[in-house]
Structure formats: C-alpha cells, structure tokens
Image (cartoon, rainbow, N blue to C red):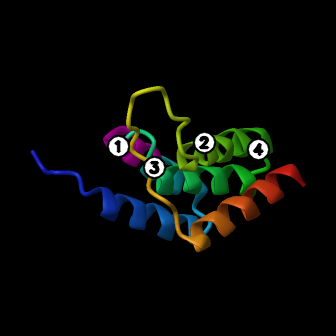
Amino acid sequence: MQEINLTDLIAQATSKLESRDFEGARELYEKALSVQKGNAAALMGMAMIYNRTDRPKEAKKLLKSLLVLFKPAKSQRGKKLIPPKKPSSQVMATLYAQLGVAHH
C-alpha cells in the first residue's frame, strides 16, 4: 500500500485551487483532512474554496475553528499545558483576510 504524503496532497490541492479547479482542490483537501484531522493548511484551503464559491457561512465556520486552534488553552489548576504552535504572521494575515472576505 502506498503511503500518503500529506505535504504533497496539500501542494496538489493548492495548485488546483490556484487554477480555479475548486472541485479537484476540495477532494484533495478532504483527503488531507482524512490523513490528519484538523490540518490547518487543509482547513484554510477549504475556507478559501468556500469563499470563492459563494459559501461564506461554511468559510466562517472553518476560519473560526482555526482561530481556536491557534489560541493558547486556558491553564487548569496544577496542570501544565502545551501551548499551540504559533502560526507565522503571514498565516494569520491570510486567516484574517479570508475571514474578512467571508464577512463581506
């Protein structure tokens, strides 16, 4: 059985998104999410598809879930929590830009 490379899946999906093959991109992003649930790049790609296909409610839902992923968890008494990986400023700018498009 051939191993699925998540990085390659995301790259292929992004290429399809950029060429406006929204259905092909959606299929690949969904496949990536089946490999790694909650993958931020795949979720962002899906939100972009939703924004570009006039489905802002779905885009907002995904983008808000990404914001939650990037926020540090509230500490609980006596427990050390691992902070989430801090996204780059470019990722955050893209996230907020897509959220703005969805709200528009």
Residue 90, percent from left and from top: 60, 73
Mark 2 falls on what kind of element? helix
Crowdedness of circle 4 by 10 Å Cα count: few (<14), some, many (20+)? Answer: some
Q: Give the number of marks.
A: 4
First of labels 3, 2 by sequence position: 2
Name the residue tied to disc 4.
55
Name the residue tied to disc 2.
68
Name the residue tied to disc 1.
36
Residue 20, percent from left and from top: 62, 66
First of labels 2, 4 by sequence position: 4
Check contact, mark 3 vs mark 1: CB within 8 A: no
Which residue shows up at 48% across the image and 57% down it?
Answer: 41
Residue at mark 2 to residue at mark 1: CA–CA distance: 17 Å
In the orientation shown, which residue stands out farthest toward the top? 77
Which residue shows up at 38% across the image and 37% down it?
Answer: 80
Name which residue type carries label 2: Val
Name which residue type carries label 4: Arg
Name the residue tied to disc 3.
84
Residue 29, percent from left and from top: 46, 50
First of labels 3, 1 by sequence position: 1
In the orientation shown, which residue stands out farthest toward the right? 104
> Looking at the image, can residue 19 be seen?
no
What is the quadrant of the N terminus in the image? top left
What is the quadrant of the C terminus in the image? bottom right
